[in-house]
Amino acid sequence: MEDPGDYRQEEREEIEQSLPAHQKWMARALRALEEREEKEQKKLIKAQMHNQAAQYDGQNCW
């Protein structure tokens, strides 16, 4: 099964190649920002799941 992230990466590269030279730097900067925000979002979700699991730690959850 193909990773959807790979498809998005290929699509971004195609779009970036079609841009004029003076706009490519902005596309790269926006892509880096988007990737950084995506990583932060994953960290927040992981922390929230950890906190929810910690609430039930040691309890019988039947």
Image (tube, rainbow, N blue to C red):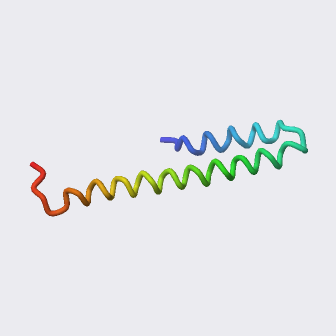
Residue shown at the point (12%, 51%) measured from the top left: 61
* 53 on left or right of 60: right
The image quadrant that residue 58 belongs to is bottom left
Q: Position of residue 46 (x, y in %)?
A: 40, 55
Residue shown at the point (31%, 57%) measured from the top left: 51
Question: Number of labelled discs?
Answer: 0
The residue sitting at the bottom extreme is 58
Residue shown at the point (90%, 44%) measured from the top left: 22
Q: Position of residue 44 (x, y in %)?
A: 45, 54
Q: Position of residue 47 (x, y in %)?
A: 39, 58
- Give whichever of 13, 20 is nearer the camera: 20
* 59 on left or right of 42: left
Above-or-below relation of 15 to 28: above
- Give whichever of 44, 31 is nearer the camera: 44
* 45 on left or right of 9: left
* 60 on left or right of 48: left
Residue shown at the point (68%, 38%) measured from the top left: 11
Q: Position of residue 53 (x, y in %)?
A: 26, 56
